[in-house]
């Protein structure tokens, strides 16, 4: 099994992003039959469905969350130090260019709306040049659903920071946290609400196929979930293939995909403590920059901390 070198720290000057150009990166459901809602606030029901087709939503209850590093959802591991390398192509203007995303689950935890959320770092390159750096803040509820509670994305051109794309933390400025990956998904699970960053359309997801076998460059997997994700107005953005114990292994763009991103898993590694520390430091530096460029959001929020 091929392993890439450990996380190489890049100069901090900016998955595939969920809720931006993906979900890449990249953001509310307990599977609608989810763990049965056992009367807990983490469950879902058809009563949460909305008339504007944003799907079934789950009440956001801070008391229903646990330590995210427990990583009880096998379809979206939250284990600090896991690093995924996914490669493919994207469209830049009228050109199709090589596209790579290195995603790292760090050990940086930020409290958002009273909930501990772990930071996942995405570093995207187009044609060998850094295009985006971003953070997704992921949380875990008692039923095993992985939520997305916020994010921060910087764009780059020629290796230089150009602008901040997406900024949100919880419900500040009317952001809407949601479930990125339910603990349980059945064939008849209705469309669910994934989330919405301030000023952006809500994203939704629904199952396409379940329990299939699927091969990518890195390996072949069984019990794979295929989930269609996209904005409410254009839900046919992409099909993502989720494998147990791994997470996203493949991304197939659909009609509504803006950049027609294709990527598949080409490597998976558990970082050493030193590699994890470097990735976590990149997150802390991105957050420091966020506090400068968007002080009304990051400048007033409680500081993140490394759990290590």
Image (cartoon, helix red, strand yellow):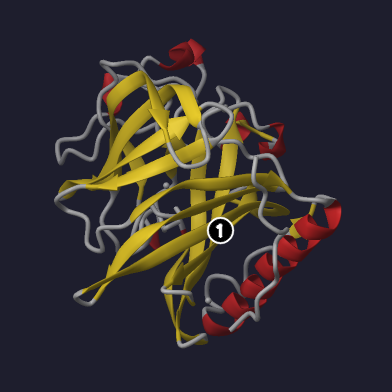
Image quarter hosting the N terminus: top right
Q: Considering only vertical position in the picture, is 68 above or below 209?
A: below
The image quarter in which residue 187 lies: top left
Q: Which residue is mark 1?
A: 102
Residue at screen point 44% across, 52% down: 26
Judge from the rendering whether residue 238 lies leftward or rightward of residue 215; answer left or right: left
Residue at screen point 21% across, 34% down: 50
In percent of width and height, residue 229 lies at 29, 42
In percent of width and height, residue 224 lies at 42, 25
Residue at screen point 63% across, 71% down: 287
Judge from the rendering whether residue 92 lies leftward or rightward of residue 218; answer left or right: left
Helix, strand or loop under label 1: strand
Mark 1 Cα-neighbour bin, 10 Å: few <14, some 14–19, many ≥20? many
Residue at screen point 73% across, 58% down: 6
Q: 115 or 90: nearer the eye?
A: 90
Residue 170 is at least partly visible in this image: no
Q: Considering only vertical position in the picture, is 134 above or below 106?
A: below
Q: Considering only vertical position in the picture, is 20 above or below 225?
A: below
Q: 105 or 61: nearer the eye?
A: 105
Judge from the rendering whether residue 196 lies leftward or rightward of residue 1; answer left or right: left
In percent of width and height, residue 252 lies at 29, 45
In percent of width and height, residue 216 lies at 43, 38
């Amino acid at each position: 099994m091929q392993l890439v070198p450990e996380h190489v720290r890049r100069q901090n000057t900016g998955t595939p992003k969920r809720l931006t150009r993906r979900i890449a990166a990249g953001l509310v459901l307990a599977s609608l039959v989810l763990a049965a809602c056992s009367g807990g606030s983490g469950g879902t029901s058809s009563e949460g469905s909305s008339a504007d087709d944003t799907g079934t939503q789950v009440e956001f209850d801070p008391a229903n969350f646990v330590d995210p590093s427990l990583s009880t959802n096998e379809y979206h591991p939250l284990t600090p130090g896991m690093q995924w390398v996914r490669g493919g192509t994207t469209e830049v203007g009228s050109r199709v260019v090589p596209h790579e995303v290195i995603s790292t689950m760090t050990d940086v935890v930020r409290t958002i709306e009273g909930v501990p959320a772990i930071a996942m770092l995405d570093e995207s390159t187009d044609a060998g040049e850094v295009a985006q750096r971003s953070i997704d803040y992921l949380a875990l509820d008692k039923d095993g659903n992985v939520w997305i509670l916020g994010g921060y994305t910087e764009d780059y051109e020629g290796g230089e920071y150009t602008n901040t794309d997406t900024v949100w933390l919880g419900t500040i400025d009317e952001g809407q946290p949601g479930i990125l990956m339910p603990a349980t998904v059945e064939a008849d699970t209705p469309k669910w609400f994934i989330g919405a960053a301030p000023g952006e359309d809500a994203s939704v997801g629904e199952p396409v196929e379940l329990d299939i076998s699927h091969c990518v460059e890195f390996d072949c997997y069984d019990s794979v979930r295929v989930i269609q994700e996209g904005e409410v107005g254009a839900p046919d953005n992409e099909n993502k293939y989720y494998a147990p114990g791994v997470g996203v292994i493949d991304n197939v763009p659909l009609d509504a995909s803006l950049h027609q991103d294709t990527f598949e898993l080409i490597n998976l590694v558990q970082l050493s403590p030193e590699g994890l520390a470097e990735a976590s430091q990149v997150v802390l530096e991105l957050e420091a920059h966020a506090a400068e460029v968007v002080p009304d959001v990051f400048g007033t929020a409680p500081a993140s901390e490394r759990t290590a």
